[in-house]
Amino acid sequence: PWAYLKIAEGCDRRCGFCAIPTFRGDQRSRSTEDLLTETRGLVASGVKELVLIAQDLASWGNDRRRHALGEAVEVLDEGGTQPLVELTRQLTGEVERLRLLYLYPSGLTTSLIETILATGVPYFDLSLQHVSRPHVRRMKRWGDGDRFLERIAAIRRAEPNAAFRSSFILGYPGETEDDHSQLLEFVEAAQLDWAGFFPYSAETGTTAAAMENQIPAELAMERLREVSELQDTITARKRDDLVGTTQRLLIDEPGIARSVRECPEIDGVILVDDQIPVGSMVDCLIVGSQGTDLEARLA
């Protein structure tokens, strides 16, 4: 009852660790008309939740606008119009649930935040990768922990029940003990619902592969285990906090459901009566937790 909708291919960014632009090229956004047509076909086939994906989702449409205007245009923070905002508004009216994945932090404008909240799916998947300012610059990326925490706090002020996911790389070349300590402090402060941690792996043709100060794999894994254990504790506590609440669930498979807080395939699930029809949307009371998963019964 859910489906991915890929809205663009390729990426205009040149992050130090990523080889995607070398084999997929610069970003090429699909047209609004094309995406609306596919969405309507998916909904007609029974899809209740649409998950928007791209290598750099928040930059959707910037390439098409550049071609139209004949000059470089990019929304880095506030001001101007962000094509993804209008697309999200149009798609929201076509499907019961709309979820956006892989948001580059500089593209998370106030307008986009408001638009995501208006979808009724207050789920923010932020592509952060690290938080130490000098280390983020080594990665050839934007932002730092303070900016990220400010954005997260702003979203929570607008919607206290918003859910957050991110991913982080451990052991990228040059990562110091201080960089790692800043990441641990951020994870504790941010209280994300979900986070993935990955050891750095050299990709041929990337800036990082040729950098000095490569981090030994054993050290990278040690750091990864430390931050993963911290996040596991936070996630378990976040899940426990949902016990006793009523959530609107989409039944994905017999006995398996999700609320707006769980993305398909990557987050935990909610266990329900396997007689509830697949594809239905039902209100359920959360009655227990099992690590990342929850148990629920019809409200």
Image (cartoon, rainbow, N blue to C red):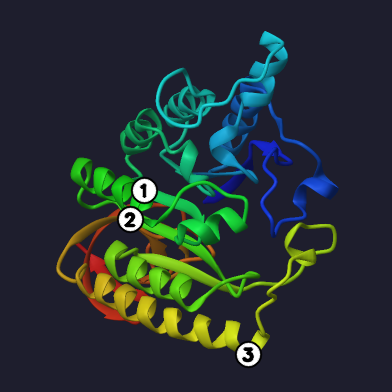
- Closer to the camera, 105 or 88? 105
How would you rate the neighbour count of disc 2 (Cα within 10 Å): few for under 14, some for 14-19, many for 20 or more?
Answer: many
Residue, x 44% and y 80% (percent of image)? Answer: 228
Judging by the rendered image, the residue that carries numbered circle 3 is 218
| Element type at mark 2 | strand
Q: Amino acid at mark 1?
A: Arg
Residue depth check, mark 1 versus mark 2: number of the one nearer the observer: 1
Q: Residue furthest left?
A: 244
Badge 1 vs badge 3, beta-carbon distance below 8 Å: no
| Element type at mark 3 | helix
Location of residue 119 in the rendering, given as x and y in whole percent from the top left corner: 36, 36
Please report whichever mark, 1 or 2, sits nearer to the chain's N-terminal start: 1
Q: Amino acid at mark 2?
A: Ala
| Element type at mark 1 | helix
How far apart, in angstroms, are the residues tagged by discs 1 and 2? 18 Å
Q: Is residue 75 left or right of residue 109?
A: right
Badge 1 vs badge 2, beta-carbon distance below 8 Å: no
Location of residue 110 in the rendering, given as x and y in whole percent from the top left corner: 34, 32
How far apart, in angstroms, are the residues tagged by discs 1 and 3? 30 Å
Residue, x 45% and y 52% (percent of image)? Answer: 125
How would you rate the neighbour count of disc 3 (Cα within 10 Å): few for under 14, some for 14-19, many for 20 or more?
Answer: few
Judging by the rendered image, the residue that carries numbered circle 2 is 163
Location of residue 27 in the rendering, given as x and y in whole percent from the top left corner: 72, 35
Q: Is residue 293 left or right of residue 46?
A: left
From this view, report whether residue 217 is shown above or below residue 19: below
Judging by the rendered image, the residue that carries numbered circle 1 is 147
